[in-house]
Amino acid sequence: MLDAAGPIDPEGLFTITAGGFSATADAYARDPDTQGLWFLSMVGAQTALKAIWGSLLKQPPETAHLVRGADGTALAGGFQRCHVPQETVGTWTTKIARLPQTGGWHALVYTKLAEYAFEREGFLLLAPGEAEAPALHYRFLDRRSPLPLHPSWAPWLWRRALRRGEAVRLEAEGVVAYRCAPAMEALREDLSEAVAAGALVLPEEADGG
């Protein structure tokens, strides 16, 4: 997953509000259909950052709002509701650090579904851009698949996941995000067919064995 937010693009800033506090969100991932918030990077006062995240993690979680524009300069339009998905409760990690240049604070909050080692079949893919998505998807899938997968299959596996709806893109700013729900039995069948048809080369052949 991403270790930190990338360079801040002023055009892509949002204000996130929850629990009576607000902060600037420079990156987030949200499901537009369910309003579920899957990833958030925000900057502001330490008190505000902790209060916002505390509100989102309440049971039941409080609703937050994203408004286009930095905190204090929110623009008209782009008003969106969001909340922590119930299925992710108990899986969240928060990293808060002081920004040395401004004296403000940065909070990176994400579900452990974005970590390779997290023991769930489904996962959250966070990438700097679309070009990195296939390789990252392969790494997650290879860890979870009972079948041996080869790195050279990454583009095929990614196209298949998109085609079958096993990788669904989220609405996001500052990051490329996909919710991934691999169907292992279907993957086994598709791999067998692809190898038999010559669309994929077996690992031994791909490695020159």
Image (tube, rainbow, N blue to C red):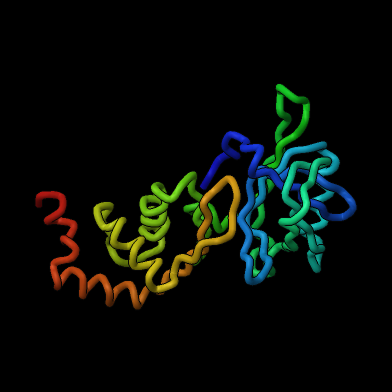
Q: Is residue 20 above or below residue 100?
A: below
Residue lying at the far right of the rendered structure: 20
- In the rendering, at what x and y percent does residue 121 appear? 47, 67
Q: Is residue 178 above or below residue 6?
A: below
* Left or right, 32 with reference to 190: right
Q: On the image, which quarter does residue 9 sit in?
A: top right
* Left or right, 126 with reference to 132: right
Q: Residue at x 83, y 41 (%)?
A: 72
- In the rendering, at what x and y percent does residue 100 appear? 71, 23
Q: Residue at x 42, y 52 (%)?
A: 133
State the residue in front, 25 or 86.
25
Q: On the image, which quarter does residue 56 sit in?
A: bottom right
Q: On the image, which quarter does residue 164 sit in?
A: bottom left
Q: Is residue 140 above or below residue 2?
A: below
Residue lying at the far front of the rendered structure: 76
Q: Residue at x 21, y 75 (%)?
A: 193
Q: Residue at x 28, y 61 (%)?
A: 156
